Image (cartoon, rainbow, N blue to C red):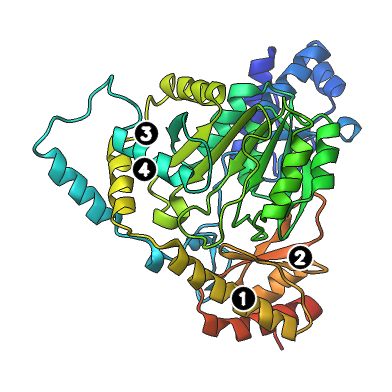
Amino acid sequence: MVITGRGSHEIADSVEREIVGGGLQAGALLPPIRDLAGELGVNPNTVAAAYRLLRDRGLVETGGRRGTRVRQRPAAAPRETGPGAVPPGTVDAATGNPDPRLLPDLGAALAAVARRRSTGAPPLYGDAPVLPAMAEAAGEVFGADGVPAASLAVTSGALDGVDRVLRSALRPGDTVALEDPGWPSEHDLLAAIGLKSVPMAVDDEGPLPGELSAALRAGARAVVVTNRAQNPTGAALSAERARALRGVLSEHPAVLTVEDDHGFGWVELPCHGVFGATDRWAVVRSVAKGYGPDLRLAMLAGDMVTVDRVRALIQTGPGWVSHALQEAFVEMWRAGAVSAEEVGRSYTGRRTALIDHLAGHGLEARGRSGVNVWVPVPDEGAAVAGLLARGWAVSPGSRFRNGARPALRVTVSALEEGDMPALAAAIAAATRHGGPAV
């Protein structure tokens, strides 16, 4: 490891090159600020500023007296383990993708858009960022669940929407309450934009009210909640839990609430939320899991100020989400190309089968909605290795949790109900014995 530079940016760039090039591995401890300052002949404040830059880039994390370490998961890492990472001959229960058989034909929708455009003027710079037909569809989508949609924006997927909402209201160093266990990309996002996180434990009905209250007392200025199909536990907000959370949030009107409803279009459970419990709020509805991950589009509703700020951030960046994608979504939505009830029942059948078979082996598991089942285990590493030896790939829970118990995330979208007895037996054997199959 060779770190060079005189200014904070030069030092940060040098460390970044070491991380990207492999000279500094995940978890590696960086030199103490004063030691590195002495080696480089610079003021300790210069090194401290360099380390802050690295933190803001999502490359390192600071632990006070424990020092500064390279993050286990760099901000540029892929969101999910891709199919290519699953060893050949291994059954994929790790990749968090939807079942391709349940996705509509995006090509047909784009072809229909192209045919209509062949006789009209193409979209140009200066056109409205949200098409009238898209705004009308989004209004109906949100209105069906009682979400006020007078102010709307369209973003490039759920994480893009969450990113822009947080940037619209927070400054580096601010704290955000996140679900634990929860979606790793949210932690990556916070690290990349210099925000801190405080965990909220979740059960099958969403974040626990006491945990939310504690996070707010600890200074959280924003809260991110998943309405349904929570990754990795499958939690879904119940009406009762949503009311309880709204009661907690109503005592903190200045807090920003962000809801990620990526379950739109493919989860049969109704959407319950906390929107409007505080002055600043946003609900982001991605279409990725129901209509296809490559349809990079999410609808965003919120209070007037938040949505206006999001629009401004989009305007100064990409300008708008492709009108072709907006038209394609409207085409499929109007045609009823996706049935949330049918898709949801398909995933529910698979989740329920796995949970029931695990119960037969004396193992508890959670998975109220979505494509994932959360299985607590005593030793994640041994369980993952034991399952690989038995021909199954699953995700270790360490990618998703902070203070939560060790567990496995098992994704059912690439499996059939008939696979579940064998998978449950393999999980039971790997959990209790680990190592290779005998």
Task: Quote the CA–CA distance across marks 2 and 3.
Answer: 40 Å
Instruction: Give the residue at mark 2.
Output: 380
Q: Disc 3 or 1, which lies upstream in sequence?
A: 3
Helix, strand or loop under label 1: helix
Front-most of 354 and 382?
Answer: 354
Instruction: Give the residue at mark 1.
Output: 352
Name which residue type carries label 2.
Glu
The reply to whether the C-beta atoms of the residues labelled 4 and 2 are less than 8 Å apart is: no
Task: Quote the CA–CA distance across marks 3 and 1.
Answer: 37 Å
Instruction: Residue at the far right: name it.
Output: 65
Residue 304 drawn above or below residue 411? above
Nearest to viewer (mark 4 / mark 2): 4
Helix, strand or loop under label 2: helix
Front-most of 68 and 7?
Answer: 68
Name which residue type carries label 1.
Thr
Instruction: Give the residue at mark 3.
Output: 321
Residue 377 drawn above or below residue 42? below
Location of the N terminus (image quadrant): top right
Nearest to viewer (mark 1 / mark 2): 1
The reply to whether the C-beta atoms of the residues labelled 1 and 2 are less than 8 Å apart is: no
Task: Quote the CA–CA distance across marks 1 and 2.
Answer: 22 Å
Task: Quote the CA–CA distance across marks 4 and 3.
Answer: 15 Å
Q: Disc 2 or 3, which lies upstream in sequence?
A: 3
How many other residues sit within 10 Å of disc 1, few (<14), some (14-19) or many (≥20)?
Answer: some
Nearest to viewer (mark 2 / mark 3): 3
Name which residue type carries label 3.
Val
Indicate the position of residue 157 as horizontal and vertical percent values: 47, 41
Front-most of 121 and 283?
Answer: 283
Residue pictured at 79% horizontal, 69% vertical: 377
Nearest to viewer (mark 1 / mark 4): 4
